[in-house]
Amino acid sequence: MSLSPSKPIVIKGVKLTYLSTKADIYKNDNCYFKIRSKDIESKFAKLNVEGYKMPWFEGKDGKFLLKAKLKNVNLPDFIPQNIYVTNISFKYYKMDDNEGYYIDHINL
């Protein structure tokens, strides 16, 4: 797959439910969301590159969760269980032997 590392990839219309905000060991405040979009696999297909690190993971219930730094989330409020229809901008990174995408910003 040929992706341009210099251009962000924007995925529109992603339904998210806010879960919580927690600090990590580096003192970054991270927001966690449950991905509610039924068509998420097709929406994120262009980002699925084997070996790349991604800002989502599968939860215990089989649903996908999304992690983003609080400073990159532009939502009007954080009400648990609220469903937000968002646009998510991903940017490519490469550091040593690691490469993948991080969330540049989430907005309505």
Image (cartoon, rainbow, N blue to C red):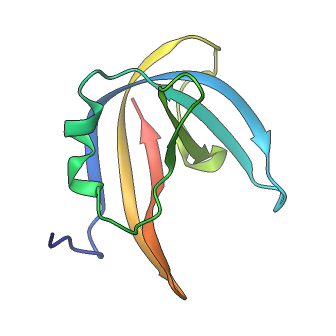
Q: Specify whether 103 is left or right of 88.
A: right
Q: Position of residue 27 (x, y in %)?
A: 83, 56
Q: Specify whether 76 is left or right of 38.
A: right
Which residue is at the far bottom? 96
* Residue nearer the viewer, 101 or 50: 50
To which quarter of the image does residue 22 belong? top right
Q: Is residue 79 above or below residue 8?
A: above
Q: Position of residue 60 (x, y in %)?
A: 60, 28
Q: Position of residue 4 (x, y in %)?
A: 21, 74
Q: Which residue is at a point 32% across and 23% down the rendered structure image?
A: 37
* Residue nearer the viewer, 50 or 102: 50
* Residue nearer the viewer, 70 or 17: 17
Q: Is residue 53 above or below residue 28?
A: below
To which quarter of the image does residue 82 belong? top right
Q: Which residue is at a point 21% across and 54% down the rendered structure image?
A: 46
Q: Which residue is at a point 73% across and 34% down the rendered structure image?
A: 21
Q: Position of residue 3 (x, y in %)?
A: 20, 70
* Residue nearer the viewer, 2 or 51: 51
Q: Specify whether 11 is left or right of 54.
A: left
To which quarter of the image does residue 50 belong? bottom left
Quadrant location of the N terminus in the rendered image: bottom left
Quadrant location of the C terminus in the rendered image: top left
